[in-house]
Image: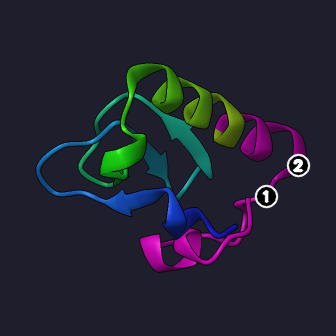
Amino acid sequence: MKLKERLFESTDRADFYFDPKEKMFTKEYNENYISLAVKGMFSEKNYISNVYRFLEGLALKYDHFNDCNSFEDLAEKEI
């Protein structure tokens, strides 16, 4: 499954962010970060937490997002 099937880039609300410089997910806002939100039917609090931890693990353990610099790059990643 591609990341874009569960997340979208959001301008008005974000569940978490992706730092394209450090290649990490965070819950802290920065204007340079990519704002991400979980798609509507999946936007339950526990699911959002699980998605965040899963993506954070992929970033930390496997450098899965090292080639991502934009939402378009993230969107096409297999998760």
Image coloring type: rainbow
**Kind of residue at badge 2:** Tyr
Q: Is residue 33 visible?
A: no
**Kind of residue at badge 1:** His
Q: Is residue 78 visible?
A: yes
- In this rendering, the answer to whether 59 lies above or below 77 is above
Give the quadrant of residue 24.
top right
Q: Is residue 61 left or right of residue 57?
A: right
User: Residue 64, labelled with which disc?
Assistant: 1
Please identify the residue farthest to the top as the structure is shown: 46
Disc 2 secondary structure class: helix
Count residues near mark 1 (Cα–Cα under 10 Å), then give few for <14, some for 14-19, many for 20+.
some
Query: Which one is nearer the viewer's eye here, 22 or 2?
Result: 2
- In this rendering, the answer to whether 74 lies above or below 17 is below
Disc 1 secondary structure class: loop
Q: Position of residue 36 (x, y in %)?
A: 37, 51
Q: Verify CB contact (< 8 Å) between mark 1 and mark 2.
A: yes
Q: Position of residue 58 (x, y in %)?
A: 78, 45
User: Magenta span covers which residues?
Assistant: 56-79
Give the residue at x 65% y 28%.
53
Give the residue at x 49% y 20%.
46
Q: Would residue 67 be counted in the magenta stretch? A: yes
Give the residue at x 11% y 50%.
12
Q: Position of residue 76 (x, y in %)?
A: 61, 78
Count residues near mark 2 (Cα–Cα under 10 Å), then give few for <14, some for 14-19, many for 20+.
few
Q: Would residue 63 be counted in the magenta stretch? A: yes
The residue wearing badge 2 is: 62
